[in-house]
Amino acid sequence: MTTTNHEHEPAIAATGLRKSYGDKTVLDGIDIQVPAGTIFSLLGPNGAGKTTVVNILSTLISADGGQARIAGHDLTAEAQAVRAAIGVTGQFSAVDGLITGEENMLLMADLHHLSKGEGRRVTAGLLERFDLVEAAKKPASTYSGGMKRRLDIAMTLVGSPRIIFLDEPTTGLDPRSRHTMWQIIRELVSGGTTVFLTTQYLEEADQLADRIAVLNGGRLVAEGSADELKRLVPGGHVRLRFSDPVAYERAATALRETTRDDEALTLQIPSDGSQRELRAVLDWLDAAGVEADELSVHTPDLDDVFFALTASPASSQPADKETVR
């Protein structure tokens, strides 16, 4: 195999992306880096610009400013090479309901200029992989929402893309279908594919993403892993429960900034959930000669992060981005 200069580049690298429609700024200079073989999730309220980012990075529309490299190719100068390396599943299904699932797949194989034999081989393999063999000969209009979504992604994979853009892929799906889709996404990444995911489901980003960016008012206002983002907002605490009232009182005296619950014999200490702060709590307990019956760490969830970071109106100037390394 020939080694290329692009081998160690990020799958997606964008700097200063800008896009306006008339006097409305949709993207106000955003930077994105996505390592190969990872899941990157872009979160944001409706109208934040998530789909615009996907459309720019997948060559569907042009940016007004900024630069990007996708799979080692310049987004503007090598648009055709970018298209050959990516797959896109949009918010709205590309499935043609008038023809069968198999015919949808074979149509995609033709669009990718696969030979008839190769197209049938790839189609058969993907229909099996996505558990669509039994439904393959039926019109796609008869498929459930989850089946259509699976067929949509199977069609995206016909060209063996290295990078897949999934724009809100589970919107409208029931919980079981959503979990099935999550498993499919995990399997894609374990096979080396890079996934760029936009979603409004915070649990989805929490479950899947290696790194999450929050888009608001046309700018990225925070970026990090799910755990890192949860530490950005207040409300995290360590909870200590005691069965011995004497130990409880000694701990309450020894520890600073505690919130007491005398009835439940529990103490709540503000904490960002980091190992350093947890060690400090344990050291205080040791110094006081006190042992808690139960210790638990509580951190804000992504809902808290999302609401804290997107609370200001999209029209207002967002805060500088908080990046957690």
Image: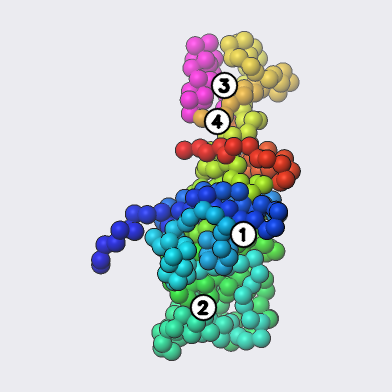
The label on residue 52 is 1
Is there a contact, CB below 8 Å, between mark 3 and mark 4? no
Circle 3/circle 2 CB separation < 8 Å: no
Give the amino acid at mark 4: Gly
- Relative image position of residue 53 (x, y in whole percent): 58, 57
Left or right, 59 with reference to 245: left
Q: Which residue is mark 4?
A: 273
Q: Is residue 311 above or below residue 274?
A: below
Question: Quick check: is 126 in the magenta stretch?
Answer: no
Which portion, as a residue range, is magenta? 275-296
Please tell me which of labels 1 and 2 falls first in the chain.
1
Q: Which residue is mark 2?
A: 127
x%, y% of residue 183? 53, 61
Inter-mark Cα distance, 4 to 2: 44 Å
Task: Please state which amino acid type lies under the numbered disc 3.
Answer: Ala
Which tag is nearer the camera, tag 4 or tag 1? 1
Confirm whether residue 103 shows in the render: yes
SS type, badge 4: loop
Q: Amino acid at mark 2?
A: Leu
**Residue at 47 percent of width and 38 percent of height:** 325
Asked which secondary structure carries label 3, the reply is loop
Residue in the foreground of this view, choosing between 74 and 110: 74
- Residue 292 disc label: 3
Residues at discs 4 and 2 in contact (Cβ within 8 Å): no
* Mark 1 surroundings: few (<14), some (14-19) or many (≥20) residues within 10 A: many
For the residues marked 1 and 2, what is the alpha-carbon distance in whole angstroms? 31 Å
The alpha-carbon separation of the residues under discs 4 and 1 comes to 35 Å
Which one is in front, 207 or 153?
A: 153
